Amino acid sequence: MAFDLLITNAVLPDGRSGQAIAVSGERIVAIGPDVAGEAGQTIDAGGLLVAPPFVDCHFHMDATLSLGLPRLNQSGTLLEGIALWGELKPMLTHEAVIVRALRYCDLAVSQGLLAVRSHVDVCDDRLLAVEALLEVKRLVKPYLDLQLVAFPQDGYFRSPAAARNLERALDLGVDVVGGIPHFERTMEEGAASVKALCAIAAKRGLMIDLHCDESDDPLSRHIEVLAAETHRLGLGGRAAGSHLTSMHSMDSYYVSKLLPLIRESGLFAIANPLINITLQGRHDTYPKRRGLMRIPEMRALGIPVALGQDCVMDPWYGLGGADMLDVAHMAVHAVPMTSREAIRWAFEAVTSVPAAVMGLQDYGLAKGCNADFVLLQARDTIEAVRMRATRLAVIRRGKVIARTQPRQATLDLPDRPASLDPSSYAPKAAE
């Protein structure tokens, strides 16, 4: 057979080695150890890992790369970040939002990140950021899937125009209903906002993704309302609760009731370890809380948990680099979860699980799927997380759209090798 692209000698995320991936047009047409044929382009993976592209199901692209505008977050806290964003919003221009977002998408592609769900603030009556990111979505469609969430950053009830603007944003083509119940003035208003937003999602047939309980307050329990409404309205499989950091501080007896409720509802959960390991526990002396949801317990019950980047160089987080392996690496340390199985899961939590959260069609490494994948300088998924592996090649719809030279060091040491490849340090038979 003749193919447009043939990847040979690849290791797949499930551990199968010596695999070939054949592409015709924009689709994978064959995958396995015995695939052979002529190809317009052949890439020898050299026994390295080929994986589906990385997916970030929680991000804020309207604010990305705005670090220092109009000033820096001196305290490093969530609330100062929100206040800073309020100062920046009146200064935003359509063009500046587009320029920063496109620069971020360039960076994302270089890191093999080809799908992003971005929350976009709708509390500005101009809907400037909404219109700008809808334009970005159109521009990047050939190489990156951008899904937008109508996010009432200042509170659905707390901000006078939020309810109207959220509906306007959805009418313009924003994909997902968003919210932030813990930022409302009272717990009661927070719960009411969850119910109102779930009703909108149900009526419109849309997905819903709420910032929920991003707090150290153990009594911030809006996730309970979200789970109940998701179950009542049949939103399971298209509803997500993001952050859920108050869960770290909750009484364990209450959590023993809460987690089965979340599982029953069919909710996705999205943790953002880079951000919440830095933002939470700010009022603690010692010991300091990590401020993450209870990922191992949720996984044990079968609740699908994804990991998000959340922010890169913006009012809330001055670091980051569109690297989802950096996110997975932090999660492994912060939770902590360092078993071999858990590290493999961390790789899935930045690939296949967020792809399910976003409802991506034809995602994965199988015959008939889109020919989207990444060649990594690692021998398996554990090594990819350990090293935050270099993306040697990024393929979108069968076309190589980014390349990076392998990481390799030259040494000048007596009686030692002249060069060093970090991927060669993979254990030979570790289970």
Image (spheres, helix red, strand yellow):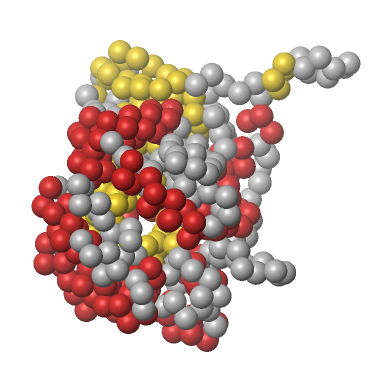
Q: Is 155 displayed left or right of 111 in the figure? A: left
Q: Residue at x 65, y 69 (%)?
A: 284
Asked whether residue 346 appears in the rendered view, the answer is no
Q: Residue at x 54, y 83 (%)?
A: 251
* Image quarter of residue 388: top right
* Image quarter of residue 183: bottom left
- Quadrant (top left, top right, bottom left, bottom right) of the N terminus: top left
Closest to the observer, 325 or 36 = 325
Coordinates of residue 236 in the picture (x, y in percent): 26, 68
Q: Residue at x 50, y 21 (%)?
A: 404
Coordinates of residue 379 in the picture (x, y in percent): 57, 35
Coordinates of residue 121 in the picture (x, y in percent): 29, 52
Closest to the observer, 46 or 373 = 373
Closest to the observer, 144 or 384 = 144
Asked whether residue 419 appears in the rendered view, the answer is yes
Closest to the observer, 173 or 400 = 173
Q: Is 302 displayed left or right of 344 in the figure? A: left
* Image quarter of residue 155: bottom left
Q: Residue at x 57, y 21 (%)?
A: 406
Q: Is residue 57 above or below residue 45?
A: below
Coordinates of residue 383 in the picture (x, y in percent): 60, 40
Q: Is residue 52 above or below residue 394?
A: below
Q: Is residue 349 above or below residue 220?
A: above
